[in-house]
Amino acid sequence: MIDLNIMKVANYINGEFKEPSTGAFQVKTSPVDGSKIAEVPRSGREDAREAIDSAFEALKAWANIPAIRRAEYLYKMLEVFRQMKEDFMKILTVEGGGTYRKVWGEVVFTERLIQNAAELARHYQGRVLQSDSESTISVVFKRSKGVVGVITPWNYPLSISMKKIAHTLAVGNTVVYKPASDTPVTGWLIAQMVAKAGLPKGVFNLVIGPGPVVGEEIVTHKRVAHVTFTGESSTGREIAAKAAGTLKTVTLELGGSDPLIILDDVDVDYAARLAVFASLFHQGQICTSAKRIIVHKAVADKFIERYVHYVKMLRIDDPRKDEKVDLGPLINERQVALMKEFVDDAVSRGGRLLIGGRSWGNFFEPAIFVDVDRNFRIMREEVFGPVRPIVVVENDDQAVEVANDTDYGLSGAVLTNNVNRAFRIAEAVESGMFHINDVTFLEESHVPFGGIKASGVGREGGEWSFHETTYDRWVTVTLRTRRFPIPSALK
Ligand code: NAD
């Protein structure tokens, strides 16, 4: 168990925990009550470069060991992770404001992610192709790309980071990892786990510091072959543009404004409970939260009454108190201020606030609006917090029209007992993922998770993570003497 009161967090470079070359530290406080958690490095570009060099040096040996050896390291990491679960849960609550149910779910999912990477490591393979030439053997090898930059957000700081780290390492890449500035202690705990698992030095490196400094150095450095990023769409755009300078590849898991569509043939009370979970779990700070609720007019009145009824029942409290707290704080003051802006914009445009909108500290009462239109900020932008619109529609076509009236395309869901209507809507909604009769934020360790439009590029999870961080290399063996089609060489 770690002692939460005396933490000084460090970078982890070339197998050693070390202070940043800048000598600068900053205090990380808890979003729950503003209390000090730890002092964390404010690293500079020099630290990022050192980590990149260390990952580069370690690359060849790590890429060349048999896949089963890398799998063994990952299984060791899984064993260490299981011993550290409680530490992780504690930090995820204190540092990230997650309720017991949120952090428990994140830890369980992370365990499956590491296990999935370990299991798949030795089963990822190239292909033997037919050749158009006689006596030629034609094969495709899967090769690791090299040094991979891992840049992650604060909302699921453990699972999103481990989804990238475990799978990236499994196929022979080395890692330079920059956690979100709001959740650096989770990043440091991940480094503790890697160190305890005994991974060879330099294979995994952690640098804690500002995105525009440490993150940017990773994105622009020519020794970094690939960047896997999860965060806001605006940051993703910036990263893609900067990565183009060295023509490195990128995986971008970005924002969403996912629709949850409720048709007229559902059990309305069940739909309302599902919608509360889908739209407000973890204070609505999930990329695939149901951010726009679209309901058929035949059940709208009853649905809205039931939804508001269940929102009222939510217990908003200090998540450290007990396991039954429903909603904890938002991650920081900036997010609280942003939620207020969304509320003010909706009110000023004539939206009807059914409930909520009050705040204290970083806690924010879910604010639910009806009578909204497409110009409201809560309809146009990603609302990464507990402010939600409910839109009433006449029919299925209109539901799809509203669902697609967004720049985003991450996930979505429809609730109905009619399989034909469900599939028609599933086909018509523009998104990387879609779920029938469930929440918008389903995720499993081995499925292709990701979005289209402004929600991202690439897929992560299981073998899809491997595709992102490997390249195909074509190799041939010619087993005969050739005749060349240049006259002077013809015999
Ligand atoms: P963010 O974009 O502000 O930050 C993400 C990371 O990028 C952080 O580590 C940050 O320090 C770093 N960063 C910032 N500027 C950078 C720069 N110029 N160069 C390099 N790195 C930089 O996002 P956030 O506020 O931490 O997270 C919330 C966002 O993440 C939401 O938009 C949410 O939808 C999205 N998200 C997406 C998924 C998904 O899988 N699609 C999952 C979770 C969260």
Image (cartoon, helix red, strand yellow):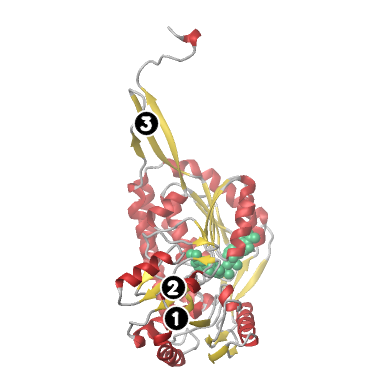
Q: Quick one: 463 or 19, which is closer to the camera?
A: 463
**Where is mark 2, residue-wise?**
397
Q: Quick one: 35 or 128, which is closer to the camera?
A: 128
- At mark 2, the secondary structure is helix
Name the image quarter holding residue 84. Answer: bottom left
Foreground: disc 2 or disc 3: 2
The image shows residue 70, relative to residue 24, as above or below, that is above
- At mark 1, the secondary structure is loop
Label 2 to label 3: alpha-carbon separation: 50 Å
In this rendering, does residue 144 appear at all?
A: yes
Amino acid type, callout 3: Ser
Q: Earlier in the sequence, mark 3 or mark 1?
A: 3
Amino acid type, callout 1: Glu
- At mark 3, the secondary structure is strand
Query: What mark, if any, has residue 138 been given in the picture?
Result: 3
Q: Is mark 3 within 8 Å of ligand 1?
A: no
Q: Position of residue 379 (x, y in %)?
A: 56, 76
Q: Is mark 1 within 8 Å of ligand 1?
A: no
Query: What mark, if any, has residue 328 been given in the picture?
Result: none
Q: Position of residue 269 (x, y in %)?
A: 35, 88
The image shows residue 253, relative to residue 331, as above or below, that is above
Q: Earlier in the sequence, mark 2 or mark 3?
A: 3
**Where is mark 1, residue-wise?**
394
Q: Position of residue 315 (x, y in %)?
A: 46, 90
Label 3 to label 1: alpha-carbon separation: 57 Å
The residue positioned 43% from the left and 49% from the top of the image is: 467
Q: Quick one: 226 or 121, which is closer to the camera?
A: 226
The image shows residue 57, relative to residue 333, as above or below, that is above
